[in-house]
Amino acid sequence: MADQGRPASPGVDTSKPSIARAYDVVLGGKDNFAIDRAVVGEMLKIVPQLPEVAAYNRQILSRGVRYLVEEAGIRQFMDLGSGLPTRENTHQVAQRSAPDARVVYVDNDPIVLAHGRALLVENENTTVVTADLRDPKSVLADPEVRRLIDFSQPVGVLLVGILHHLHDSEDPKGVAQAYMDAVPSGSHLFMTSFCASFPEAAELEETYLSVLGTGRFRTLEELQGFFGDLEMVEPGLVPLPEWRPETPVDHDLTVAELLMAGGIGRKR
């Protein structure tokens, strides 16, 4: 693991858990510290299926980005709260279908920039920006964002697996709206988030809030509100496995499959 054999990157606080590193733990990665693994250990006591949930989130990321590139014609993406690089990143999925696709990753954890530097070297159409997505004005004005994103053309705005880490007092709906206000007609919002659609949701939310400090489980109605008046892409806002699955879902959904919901909306 990251605290066994190599030092932390400059600016990385190894005494506090990180959302990006905790997600890395759940995905089976190695870029995390003891505090992150301890937090995930507490979460797993409540919902042992969290690794499955993380896998579902990565799978819908791939399906959603493919849709945006191949069917919606999107060629530029802002991946907000992107987390640590792992397999099938947004730029890899997008550029497989459209080599000219441009991707900006935004995350406030400096470890994401440290690991993303390789992207800057190998791919001129991809960059990583250290910024707080809760401050849309600063993110949208960032020179690296402006270098790659042409705001006169449609943009894919990704808030995948991150809005549940914004408290109600941080106005997550307003944050999502601010980004969509900045992009033109034809842009899309792609969002996934924890959903209060199963009995254990309240207990898991309590665990998240106590050990990580964030992790809101919102109802489908609350999550739908993030899309405002956007035109929803079929099948709408649904549990992750039900969003355009590659094979039919012909069974009752498990807790792991119900834990997150996702969807894509188009700006008219």
Image (cartoon, rainbow, N blue to C red):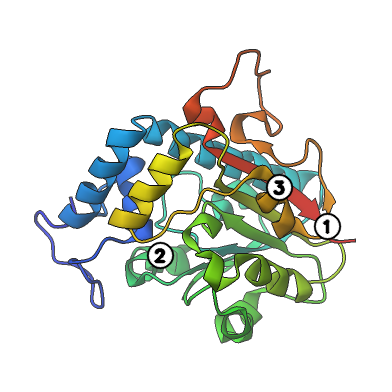
Residue type, numbered disc 3: Glu
Q: Identify the secondary structure beneath mark 1.
A: loop
Disc count in the image? 3
Q: Residues within 10 Å of mark 1 (few under 14, many from 20)?
A: some
Q: Residue at x 50, y 65 (%)?
A: 167
Residue 232 lies left or right of residue 134; in this view the side is: right
Amino acid carrying mark 2 in the image: Gly
Report if residue 169 is visible in the image. yes
Residue 262 percent across, percent down from the top left = 64, 43
**Pointer 3 residue:** 221
- Residue 1 is situated, as x and y percent measured from the top left of the image, at 17, 50
- Pointer 1: what residue? 230
Left of 264 or right of it: where is 249? left
CA gap between label 1 and label 2 equals 32 Å
Percent x, y of residue 85: 42, 55
Q: Quadrant of residue 149?
A: bottom right
For the point 65% across and 81% down, which residue is it? 146
Q: Position of residue 118 (x, y in %)?
A: 39, 64
Residue that numbered label 2 is attached to: 116
